[in-house]
Amino acid sequence: SEFFKWEFATIVASWVIKIQPFDQPNVESAKVVARKMVQEYKETGKLSELPISCEENGIKITSNFQSSSVRDQIQNFLSQLEKQNQDGPLPYVAIQAYVQMNKNNEELLQKIRTAIQQKYKVATTLGFGPRFLHSTGQLHKGDAGNGLFIQFIYDPEIDLPIPDEAANDKSSISFGVLIKSQALGDRQALLDNNRKLITINLGKDIQSSLEKIYNCVR
C-alpha cells in the first residue's frame, strides 16, 4: 500500500507541474529494436554479432576506438570526461550491467563505479539490466546528452529456454537471447540518440573479467 501511495503521489505531482508521467518515447524505441532482434533470432537462429574493437583475456570490446589493449580502450573512452568537464554540462557515467544481480557481481561493479567517480570527479550510476530500462532508461536517452555509458554483457554458460506457450515445452528463444536482445536494443537506441557508449562482453567468467576492468579504471 505504501508503494502504491507514492506511485499515485508521483502521478499527481506530474500533473501539477504539467508533465506526462506515462510518456516514455525513448524507452519504447529500445523495445522496438529488441523486438526486431528477437524476431531475427527466431527466423535465423542467431543474433547479429557486434564488431569487435579489441579482444583480450576473454574480454571483447565494441567501441569507436581501435586498440589491442582493454586498458587503452577503457581509458580512451573515459578520457572524454575531461573534455566534457571543460566544455559543456557536467558529465556522468552510467554503468549498465546485464549480468546476474548477486552480491559478488554487485560488489565488483560498485568498485568500478567508485573508482571512476574518484578518479574523474563525476557522478556515477549503476543499474542492472534489463530492469533499469524501465526507470533510468528514459533518462539515459532523453536527457541533455552528457552521459557516458559502459554496457556490460556476458556469455551465459547455462541458458534456460522460454516456452512459446503455456503447458508446451517447445521454445524458440532462451532467457539469455532475450536479455542480450534487450541490451543490444538499448545500445542501438543510445547510439541513435548520439550517446557515447562502450560495450564490454565479459565472456563466461564474469568476476574475473570485472576484476580486470577494475584494474584498468583505478
Image: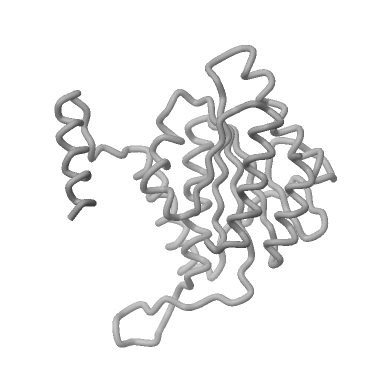
Q: Quadrant of the N terminus?
A: bottom left
Q: Position of residue 118 (x, y in %)?
A: 67, 32
Q: Position of residue 203 (x, y in %)?
A: 70, 62
- Closer to the camera in the image, 156 or 208: 208
Residue under the image location 58 percent in, 34 percent down: 93
Q: Position of residue 80 (x, y in %)?
A: 68, 25
Q: Quadrant of the C terminus?
A: top right
- Closer to the camera in the image, 48 or 29: 29
Q: Is residue 154 above or below residue 159?
A: above
Q: How is the image coloured?
A: one colour
Q: Is residue 57 left or right of residue 130?
A: right
Residue under the image location 53 percent in, 36 percent down: 191
- Closer to the camera in the image, 66 or 8: 8
**Tag count:** 0
Residue under the image location 34 percent in, 87 percent down: 168
Q: Position of residue 76 (x, y in %)?
A: 75, 32
